[in-house]
Image (spheres, rainbow, N blue to C red):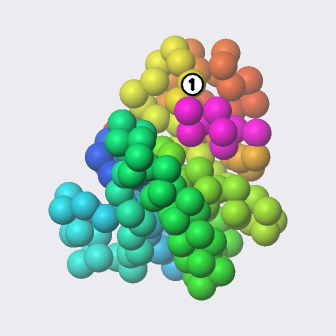
Amino acid sequence: MKKVMFISSMGGHLNELLQLKPLFSKYKSVFVSEKTPSTLFLKDQYKTYYLVYATKHEMWKYIFVFPFNCLKSLYLFLKEKPDVIVSTGSHTAVPMCYIAHLFGKKVIYIETFANIYTKSMAGKLVYPIADYFVVQWESMLELYPDAVYGGWIF
């Protein structure tokens, strides 16, 4: 059975990822998100790891947290050895996608539902290395010509 690591930041990105729930039982699933009060429920339902929460709006904290999360992502990848990474973004997931790509594993990225006409920063970064890049709006195919239109996951 393939091991799939599902990773996203908290909030809307995690809500989108959780829409894939029918897939969770079909694979050995592992979850990675940011540790906040709103994500603690994950550990009660799934095998879950947490990264440190920080936003680019708190730049001084982010400068230290992002490199730490990159190293922790590498540790989690080596520990869990997933076959596939599935992500809905955002910045929290980018390092894990690159790590998986470097190790020759599949990267499936679902661009956020929130963007209809503009690329997300995480999408811009992951698009060149994703094995399968999914957009939820047909209009996004103009920005990501090699993407697959998958429709809404809601």
Picture layout, residue 130 above or below residue 111: below
Query: At 42% across and 31% down in the image, what residue appears?
Result: 113
Q: Nearer the viewer, residue 58 or 43?
A: 58
User: Can residue 141 be spotted in the picture?
Assistant: yes
Q: Nearer the viewer, residue 2 or 61?
A: 61
Q: Residues within 10 Å of mark 1 (few under 14, many from 20)?
A: some
Q: Locate the N terminus and report the quarter of the image it occupies.
A: bottom right
Instruction: Please state which amino acid type lies under the numbered disc 1.
Output: Lys
Query: At 51% across and 63% down in the image, what residue appears?
Result: 69
Q: Nearer the viewer, residue 49 or 15?
A: 49
125 left or right of 65 in image: right
Q: Which residues are magenta?
A: 121-128
In this view, the residue farthest toward the left is 37
Residue 141 falls in which quadrant of the image? top right
Query: At 29% across and 46% down in the image, what residue appears?
Result: 11
Residue 99: x %, y % from top left? 70, 63
Picture layout, residue 36 above or below residue 149: below
Q: Nearer the viewer, residue 122 or 149?
A: 122
- Determine which residue is flagged by label 1: 119
99 left or right of 109 in image: right
Residue 145: x %, y % from top left? 73, 24
Residue 147: x %, y % from top left? 68, 32
| Disc 1, SS | loop
